[in-house]
Each structure stands twice: as C-alpha cells, then as structure tokens.
Image: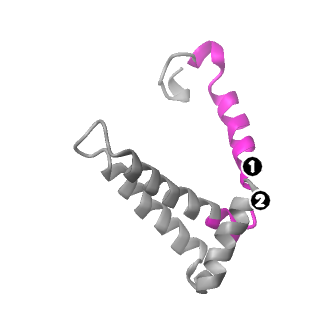
Amino acid sequence: MDPHTQELIRNMVAEREWGQFHTPENLAKSIAVEAGELLECFQWNGTPDDAAVQSELADVLTYCFLLADALDLDVDQIVQDKTNVTRAKYPVEKAQGRSTKYDRL
C-alpha cells in the first residue's frame, strides 16, 4: 500500500478519534456493509454512475486497509501470498478462459 495513502487514512481516523470503534470485528462488518452499498450501484442498472461506484469502492478499500492495519498485516504481502495460492489452485493450462471452481478443473 502506498505509505502516503496509509498515513492519510490513519490521520483522518486519529483526528476524529475513531480508532476506539475500529475493532477487527467492527471493521469486518463495515467492509460487508460498504460492499453491499457498492453492489447496490449495479442493482438495477448495468451502467451505474461512475462517481457512486468510485465512492463506494473507496469506502470498501478504506475499511480493508484499516482492518489490515488493525491486525498488523502488510497489505502488499497478504495479496502477494494469496495470489501465489490462487496460481497454484488455478494453473493456467487448466483455468485459462474458464470460470470453473478449482476443485472441478
């Protein structure tokens, strides 16, 4: 994660004293709530308002970054680790161009 963005988020939270509310449980709930709001942008329209999508996606990402920070996780590292797991589960020669779940390839 860009250190500037991480610091921007941390400062916003600190200035408002919101850290007291940012337990891992509350942050995980907030991710789900905001993901629902993002999905709502697409509910009735295949071409949603770009500004609304960007705003809701920013909320989802912000809560994800806050949760990783609360759990002292390196966002870049956990994404890289998960990508390696996914590559192993979905080898190119079996998965390319397919949406089949790994256990059915």
**Magenta residues: mostly which secondary structure?**
helix
32 or 49: nearer the viewer: 49
Q: Is residue 60 left or right of residue 7?
A: left
Q: Which label sits on residue 3?
A: 2
The residue positioned 22% from the left and 44% from the top of the image is: 44
Q: Residues within 10 Å of mark 2 (few under 14, many from 20)?
A: few
Taking the spot 59% from the left edge, 15% from the top edge, the residue there is 94
Residue 81 in picture, x, y percent from top left: 74, 43
Q: Is residue 29 above or below residue 37?
A: below
Element class at badge 2: helix
User: The disc labelled 2 sits on which kind of residue?
Assistant: Pro
Q: Is residue 88 magenta?
A: yes
Amino acid on which the number 1 mark rests in the picture: Asp
Name of the residue lying farthest toward the left: 44
Q: Secondary structure at mark 1?
A: helix
Frontmost of labels 2 and 1 is 2
Image-based side of 6 in relation to 28, left or right: right
**Residue 67, percent from left and from top:** 62, 66
The number of numbered badges drawn on the structure is 2
Q: In x, y percent, where is residue 20?
A: 60, 86
Between 101 and 9, the residue placed more toward the observer is 9
Residue on which disc 1 sits: 76
Q: Earlier in the sequence, mark 2 or mark 1?
A: 2
Q: Which residues are magenta?
A: 66-95
Q: Is residue 91 magenta?
A: yes
Q: Which of the image's four quarters has the C terminus?
A: top right
